[in-house]
């Protein structure tokens, strides 16, 4: 399920600063503390969305993550969102019969 794409189809985005759209879409996930903050899914996506309503409580984020990876068909990005989290859209590994994009990350423990 492409949550970033679903959010972008349901939101209005007039008068945005260049490059801020993807950050704002990612903010919805973090501010609402949900891996899928749209309920019900957009009408156009209902058949393509595989959501098990019996596990709805498990969609919630117990805390704001330091790193959130959300693969999407939308523009690839890696941005700091809400001054605490890094959100990465590595893209899709394949696009039809051609290659897609991916992200390589080095994650190091924080110094205490």
Image (tube, rainbow, N blue to C red):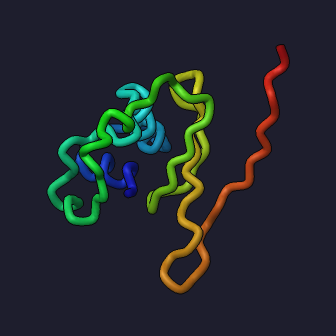
**Position of residue 13 measured from the top left corner of the image (x, y, whole percent):** 30, 42
Picture quadrant where residue 76 is located: bottom right
**Position of residue 69 measured from the top left corner of the image (x, y, whole percent):** 56, 45
Q: Nearer the viewer, residue 35 or 5?
A: 35
Residue 21, above or below 74 = above
Task: Using the rendered image of the protein, determine whether residue 14 is visible from the camera's viewpoint.
Answer: no
**Position of residue 79 measured from the top left corner of the image (x, y, whole percent):** 59, 38
Q: Residue furthest bottom?
A: 97
Q: Residue furthest right?
A: 111
Residue 91, above or below 68 = below
Q: What residue is shown at x 20% (from left), y 52% (from top)?
A: 42
Q: Residue furthest left?
A: 43
Q: What residue is shown at x 40% (from left), y 28% (from top)?
A: 33
**Position of residue 89 measured from the top left corner of the image (x, y, whole percent):** 55, 51
Q: Nearer the viewer, residue 110 or 79?
A: 110
Q: Is residue 13 left or right of residue 21?
A: left
Picture quadrant where residue 1 is located: bottom left
* Quadrant in the picture for the C terminus: top right
Task: Using the rendered image of the protein, determine whether residue 59 is visible from the camera's viewpoint.
Answer: yes
Q: Is residue 27 left or right of residue 93?
A: left
Q: Residue furthest front?
A: 54
Q: What residue is shown at x 59% (from left), y 55% (from top)?
A: 90
Q: What residue is shown at x 32% (from left), y 42% (from top)?
A: 55
Task: Tally the marks.
Answer: 0
């Amino acid at each position: 399920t492409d949550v970033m794409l679903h959010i972008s189809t349901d939101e209005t985005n007039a008068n945005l600063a260049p490059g801020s759209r993807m950050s704002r879409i990612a903010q919805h996930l973090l501010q609402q503390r949900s891996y899928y903050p749209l309920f019900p899914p957009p009408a156009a996506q209902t058949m393509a969305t595989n959501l098990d309503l019996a596990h709805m409580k498990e969609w919630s984020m117990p805390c704001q993550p330091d790193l959130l990876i959300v693969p999407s068909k939308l523009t690839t990005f890696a941005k700091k969102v809400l001054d605490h989290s890094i959100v990465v859209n590595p893209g899709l590994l394949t696009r039809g019969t051609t290659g897609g994009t991916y992200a390589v990350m080095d994650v190091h423990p924080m110094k205490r």
